[in-house]
């Protein structure tokens, strides 16, 4: 069973920041928060992951609350190509135990001009 | 970098026929995953391998499904006999033993009529 809760859908205007929330209230101390996205007809694509500190890369930023029970993925300047299903997943890091990603239903983000 | 390579990309077959899906993971990746995606059930983990050994096959729906990994660069997912409810997109993915990123292929689109 997926350990996360996400809104079913969100809309965002092109050029604006897209903030995608995720609740993971039962997260364990050794579990990371991962974000993947799936653009229509393609395989899922890794975006970012974090444990407890905020993280940023060329694609997005990840803000994790201090109690680690929720997080927000931020796409700072959304474009039409960011329209996709975004999945928030919690799991132990690969080097701790070889585990697979278990996907929930994700959030469908629609970016419009 | 070639990425995860799946074949065939699209297949239409008649009920009762055998279907074989193929996957070539990224070179150097020790983990290989098979997922299935449908509108009703979303992305489901079927099975995953580590160093060519199946680790968790609890997601394999029934005995009609089988997966093998004869070597580090090749895996197959076989359905025999196929049924219309097997129609789905089948994704193969791979990752390094210490890697946090799982890389997905473009999927094999299967239609059983």
Image (cartoon, helix red, strand yellow):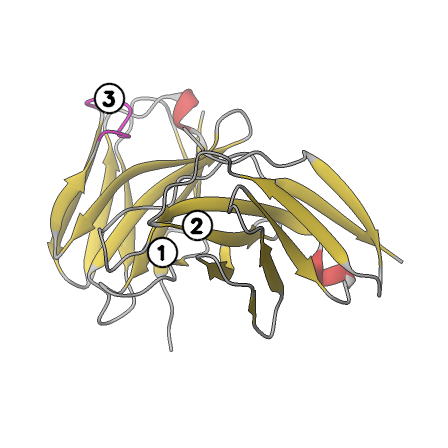
Q: Quadrant of residue B99?
A: bottom left
Residue ID for mark 3: B62
Residue ID for mark 1: B6
Is disc 2 in contact with disc 1, using a CB cutoff of under 8 Å?
A: yes
Measure the alpha-carbon separation of dots 2 and 1: 6 Å
> Residue B111 at what x, y percent from top left?
46, 33
Residue in the foreground of this view, choosing between A16 and B10 = A16
> Residue B23 at what x, y percent from top left?
29, 55
Q: In this view, does B56 lie above or below A98?
A: above
In the image, is A101 to the left or to the right of A104?
left
Disc number lying in front (3 or 1): 3
The chain carrying label 1 is B
Measure the alpha-carbon separation of dots 3 and 1: 22 Å
- Boundaries of the magenta span: B58-63
Question: The residue tagged with tag 2: helix, strand or loop?
Answer: loop
Residue at image position (37%, 58%) is B102
Question: The residue tagged with tag 1: helix, strand or loop?
Answer: strand
The chain carrying label 3 is B
Same chain under badges 3 and 1? The reply is: yes
In the image, is B57 to the left or to the right of A15?
left
Residue ID for mark 2: B107
């Amino acid at each position: 069973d997926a350990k996360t809760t996400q809104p079913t859908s969100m809309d965002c205007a092109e050029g604006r920041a897209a903030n995608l929330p995720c609740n993971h209230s039962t997260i364990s101390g050794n579990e990371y928060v991962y974000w993947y996205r799936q653009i229509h007809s393609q395989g899922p694509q890794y975006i970012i992951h974090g444990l407890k500190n905020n993280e940023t890369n060329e694609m997005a930023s990840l803000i994790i609350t201090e109690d680690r029970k929720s997080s927000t993925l931020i796409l700072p300047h959304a474009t039409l190509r960011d329209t996709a299903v975004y999945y928030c997943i919690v799991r132990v890091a690969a080097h701790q135990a070889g585990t697979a990603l278990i996907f929930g239903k994700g959030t469908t983000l629609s970016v419009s001009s | 970098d070639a990425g995860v390579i799946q074949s065939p990309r699209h297949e239409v077959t008649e009920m009762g026929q055998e279907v074989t899906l193929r996957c070539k993971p990224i070179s150097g990746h020790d983990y290989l995953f098979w997922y299935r995606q449908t509108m009703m059930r979303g992305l489901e983990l079927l099975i995953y391998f580590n160093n060519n050994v199946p680790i968790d096959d609890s997601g394999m729906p029934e005995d009609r499904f089988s997966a093998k990994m004869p070597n580090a660069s090749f895996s197959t997912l076989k359905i025999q006999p196929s049924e219309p409810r097997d129609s789905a997109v089948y994704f193969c993915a791979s990752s390094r033993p210490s890697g946090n990123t799982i890389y997905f292929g473009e999927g094999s689109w299967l239609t059983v009529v």
